[in-house]
Amino acid sequence: GRGGGERERGEREGEGGRERGRERERGERERQREKGREREGRERGREREGEREGQREKGRERERERGERGAERERERERQRERGERERGERERQRERGGGREKGRERGRERER
């Protein structure tokens, strides 16, 4: 974010400033990468723990989810149906609009004649 401002200040100071700015940016990038790595490691650890716990709960969860999943699937189907209808409506509208445009052009040509 502040990288741009720093670089400009560096350029005003001359080459040394610019170099300093570049170094700082490199440091920032490295830090970000490390943060990412740490996060990934943590998440992986969590997943492993989750799996251990998950096996215990899996039987219970599956039974619970069977009911929920049915409801979820229904909801999804509804959503997709609505989306499909909406898209179909828009397509038709665009087709009509396109037709109107063409008709307009034709009328223009006829007027020219």
Image: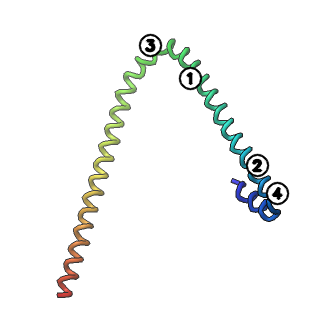
Is tag 3's residue or tag 4's residue first in the polypeptide sequence? 4
Cα gap from disc 2 to disc 4, whole angstroms:
12 Å
- Tell me the SS state at disc 3: helix
Location of residue 89 by image quarter = bottom left
Above or below, 19 against 33 in this view is below
Between circles 1 and 3, the one closer to the viewer is 1
x and y percentages locating residue 55 in the rendered image: 50, 13
Q: Closer to the N terminus: mark 2 or mark 1?
A: 2
The residue positioned farthest toward the front in the image shown: 15
The amino acid type found where label 1 is placed reads Glu
Of 65 and 10, the residue lying toward us: 10
Q: CA distance from mark 1 to mark 3?
A: 18 Å
Quarter occupied by residue 15: bottom right
Mark 4: amino acid:
Gly
Label 2 Cα neighbours within 10 Å, binned few <14 / some 14-19 / many ≥20: some
Dot 1 alpha-carbon crowd within 10 angstroms: few under 14, some 14 to 19, many 20 or more: few
As drawn, the label of residue 59 is 3
Identify the mark nearer the N-term, 2 or 3.
2
Q: Residues within 10 Å of mark 3 (few under 14, many from 20)?
A: few
Q: Which mark is residue 24?
A: 2
Distance, label 3 to label 4, CA atoms, is 65 Å
| Earlier sequence position, callout 1 versus callout 3 | 1
38 above or below 95?
Answer: above
